[in-house]
Image: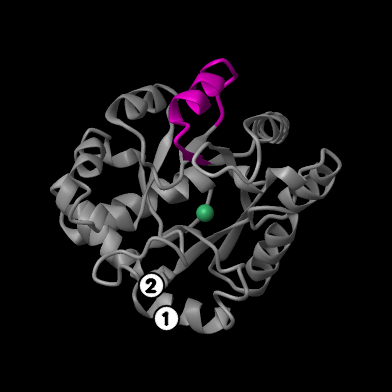
Amino acid sequence: MIDTHCHLNFPDKFPNPAATIQEATEAGVDRLIVIGCDPESSRAALELAKQFDGVYCAVGWHPTYTSNYTRESLDEIEEMLSHPKTVAIGEIGLDYHWDYSTPEQQKVALLDQLELAKRLGKPVVFHARDAYPQLIDILESRERLPYLFHCFGGTTEDAVRAMKLDAMFGVDGPVTYKNAGDLRQTLATIPADRLVLETDSPYLSPMPHRGKPNTPAYVVHVNAALAQVLGLSEAECAAQTTRNAERFFGLSR
Ligand SMILES: [Zn+2]
């Protein structure tokens, strides 16, 4: 399996990445994509990707970090995107839940990074919170790229619009939560070849680890819950979501 979204690049949360990667490998999670949130965490993500075989990275400005965004910083993001283990630009998007940055700051960074992705032909990993319709409005008005909505938490209507953009959808710990019936219903409307597994470690631990720090090994719990939603065996769900992630991120093997 592939954990397509984790933050092993947060050193205070993962002081010993080698041990975390080993633990994931033993659980059957042999590849990880480490996601940047700003230039510093993107650099750290790329360092991990260079250091470990099964680790890849995405680089970019997360919307809640964009109060520090500068256009000049995109030169470095672009340089990092030229490394073969940098498989996407992300996580970028809109987050109207938190107000660490204004909607205007978020939009400027989003549009600049979409332009960069278009110029380089790179897949895009989105973070959206309380802003799915606004983000999808923007994407519908632009030339289409390979899009992945990380930790999809939109409505069924948002999912329908995203599917028309040929987007992919990331599934995380919340699919295991008792009160997430709406999410499971929405996920059940999405074709199985559009779904990928992720943890968003150290956040959003799946059951039975909810409330404790998350780790890439726990993707097995996300897979088990998604398999149930899709009516697949765990092995089928793991194989399908792995193929999807390989296709989206251009991973071989
Ligand atoms: Zn994230």
The disc placed on residue 217 is 2
> What residue range appears in magenta?
127-145
Q: Relative to residue 40, is residue 145 depicted above or below?
A: above
Indicate whether 192 appears above or below 119.
Answer: below
User: Mark 1, residues whose alpha carbon is within 10 Å: few (<14), some, or many (≥20)?
Assistant: some
Q: Name the residue under label 1.
A: 23
Residue at 36 percent of width and 35 percent of height? 154
Q: Where is residue 178 in the image (x, y as percent from the top left)?
A: 18, 55
Residue 244 lies, in percent from the top left, at 39, 46
Work out whether residue 90 can be spotted.
no
**Residue 110 visible in rendering:** yes
Decide if residue 136 is on the left or right side of residue 62. left
Picture quadrant of residue 239: bottom left
Residue placed farthest to the front in the image? Answer: 99
Give the amino acid type for the residue marked by disc 1 in the picture.
Answer: Glu
**Relative to residue 229, is residue 136 depicted above or below?**
above
Membership of 243 in magenta stretch? no
Pointers 1 and 2 in contact (C-beta within 8 Å): yes
Q: Tag 1's secondary structure?
A: helix
**Disc 2 element:** helix
- Which of the two residues, 140 or 195, is positioned nearer the viewer here? 140
